[in-house]
Amino acid sequence: MDEKSLWEENMGSSVTRFAAGLLAVTGIALFAGVGPAQAQSSVKIGYALSRTGPNAGGAAVTTLPNYEMWVKEVNAAGGLKLGDKRVPIEIVQYDDRSSAEEAARALERLITQDKVDFILPPWGTGLNLAVGPILNKSGYPHLASTAVTDRAPELAKRWPNSFWLLGTSAGAANTLVDLLVKLRTEGKIGDTVAMVSVADGFGIDLSGAARPALTKANFKLAYDKTYPVGTQDLSPIVNEVKALNPDVFIAFSYPPDTLGLTEQARIAGFNPKIFYTGVGTAFPLFKQKFGANAQGVMGIGGWSGDSAPIKDYLARHKAASANGAEPDRWASAVTYASLQMLQQAIERVGKIDREAVIKDLQTGTFDTVIGKVKFENNLPTKYWWVGQWQDGEFYGVGPATNEGARAPIIPKPAWKAP
Amino acid sequence: MNRMRLAAALAGCAGLAVLALLPMYADAYYLALAIGLLQFTVLATAWGLFSGPTRYVSLATTAFFGVGAYTVAVLGELLPWPLVLLIATAIGALMAVIVGLSTLRLSGLHFVIFTFGLAELIRQLVIWYEVNKTRVLGRYVFVDITQKDIYWQLLVLAVAVFVIGWLIARSRLGFALRIIGEDETVAKHCGINVTIAKVTLFAISAVFMTLVGAIMAPRWTYIEPSIAFNATISFEVVIMALLGGAHRLWGPALGAIPLTLLFEFLAARFPTASTLIMGVIFLLIVYALPAGVVGLWDNFRRQWRPQRVEQGAGA
């Protein structure tokens, strides 16, 4: 009997504790579930972004501010213009926790449970590919503005509802090599190149495309190594490369290593004629960290910094962000442009007709912050692949044939003491 | 008792038939949810298969899951599907035997840490291989497998894990493992080959995890190491099995089903705070239900039985 009552006491308390906890959680759930009544007529737009997990950083810089800014702007104007009336946008959003499985399920929830009218894509190559088949099967337009994949042309054919706005890694690498060839012909650089790449999707794809292109163009690849994601100490790489004294330094790097390599190069006084780094060079953070030392650094991305729509976009983005944050100079403007295209296609169709909107996206011409865009086989015809920091702005310098392309500053000016 | 068994078996068959027909009337979302439920039921049950009797807490789930997914990423477009699954089975088993032989001598905390490191080790090996040998990172899985096919395959796997678990519990192996769980030294003195018993069970459990990864891979189109070797899965599986109670075959499923539904509810209702609330719930489970739902059930039963005896004595 004693044993039993003792056990009952334990049991009782643990059950009570669990129940109390559960009750508290349910309470929060119910409380938070009571939202304001929804407007009657609205266009429901859904998205799942990585609010947590490894993708959260990228989504928070490039994707979310643009989605929020666009919705705010459209709704401030009264909403999307459907026929002769304006209908406000209503947002349904989820966290995909940077997981392909969660992203897939969140989109299925958006489609079958929330019955949203349109879906904005997740951030990053992997997640865009994970949701591709779902959006295709349900007939939603898929404007992938943060995915770089060499299979873009093939994917566009496989999923005619999908548009791959950021292009292929081969495009990025070949444009860079073309620019190097041009500069060598002009006698501005020699032909020794040192290349490092991060051992992850981005670095492997780009170095994989650049390697044969450089060899074909008769560049001497004096250094060609990879380093693991998250490498903290990059000074051995920089010192080794410095000893080889190359004309061109190429790093297909991720944001932390982009900052690390640049910092190490400055400390070591390694100042090649061309200093090119990968993802993160186009971030406003880069300019904040290096100030005047950013001058002449090249990197992936770029935009037409002199164009009026871009200047206007930059100003609006700063005003719309909570802390006056600037957009990055690569996928941000493209993301915003993709929203403008979606809006223009919807308004031209004049009703919620996804099939017609996809058709309009395939065939129409769009007026966006990155200029006039017309898809060919669901891919844009021009991209900014090489940018350079010039007087505090990250201008597009390659392809040189792009409208608004600036002439690159060669050689890169010497590092200054900070 | 026999009649009860028969009734349970019949109910089981009827339930299975309903589950098998589910894709016919569920929409894409409920099918996805059902896939999630089956995925975690199999993973948690497979985890409990090894960790329940031996009391080794393994965080290697994602290592095997990822290896399965990667097998499909590499071979999915080249070989017929059953062959791909067969190869995944072989790789999972082989890996489990190698890992088991080298680590199951470790005990307690050392084993936990090693298994956690294992997923990272394999992830790095895959990265190293892809970077230096194939020079592609990120593979595309374009195979002709629908969501319904994934569901049915997982359902078959779920039945298999329960049948095999039931058979093991009734075999000499199961008995040996229970003794090992109670006291490994005693087990050795009884003449049980402790290593073989543990490695065998570890391999069986790992094969199921590998197959879940292989079956799930076509859902994502694109596989890269960070997608395939997602450490969260390991932790989710452990917490599910702990909530359910790992010392019974059907215990982990009792944790996997409510928690998957709860995660889904939280993800839908609190898109920005779901991870936070999940953390609180994990704490609650460990704190309030150390023996899991099964423990609760066992305690209720224990309480109920003596009472009956007392009543009988009184009458």
Image (cartoon, rainbow, N blue to C red):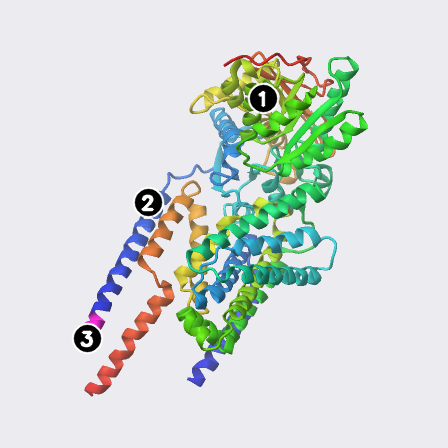
Output the chain of dot 1: A
Q: Is residue A378 visible?
A: no
Chain for numbered disc 3: A
Mark 1 belongs to which amino acid?
A: Ala
Chain on which label 2 sits: A
Task: Tell me the element at label 1.
Answer: helix
The verdict on residue A246 being magenta is no
Nearer-N-terminus badge (3/1): 3
Residue B95 location (% of width, % of height): 60, 59
Where does the image place residue B164, in percent across and percent down from the top left?
54, 72
Label 3 Cα neighbours within 10 Å, binned few <14 / some 14-19 / many ≥20? few
Pinpoint residue B292: horizontal percent, then vertical percent.
37, 63
In screen coordinates, is B103 left or right of A224? Answer: left
From the image, tell me which residue sits under label 1.
A265
Res. A31 mark: 2
Circle 1 or circle 2, nearest the eye: 1
Is residue A316 rendered to the left or right of residue A169? left
| Residue B89 seen in the current view | yes
- Residue A1's disc is 3
Question: Element at badge 2?
Answer: helix
As drawn, A411 above or below B120: above
Q: Residue at x 67, y 56 (%)?
A: B145
The earlier-in-sequence mark between 2 and 3 is 3
Q: A231 or A34: nearer the eye?
A: A231
Q: Nearer the viewer, mark 2 or mark 3?
A: 3
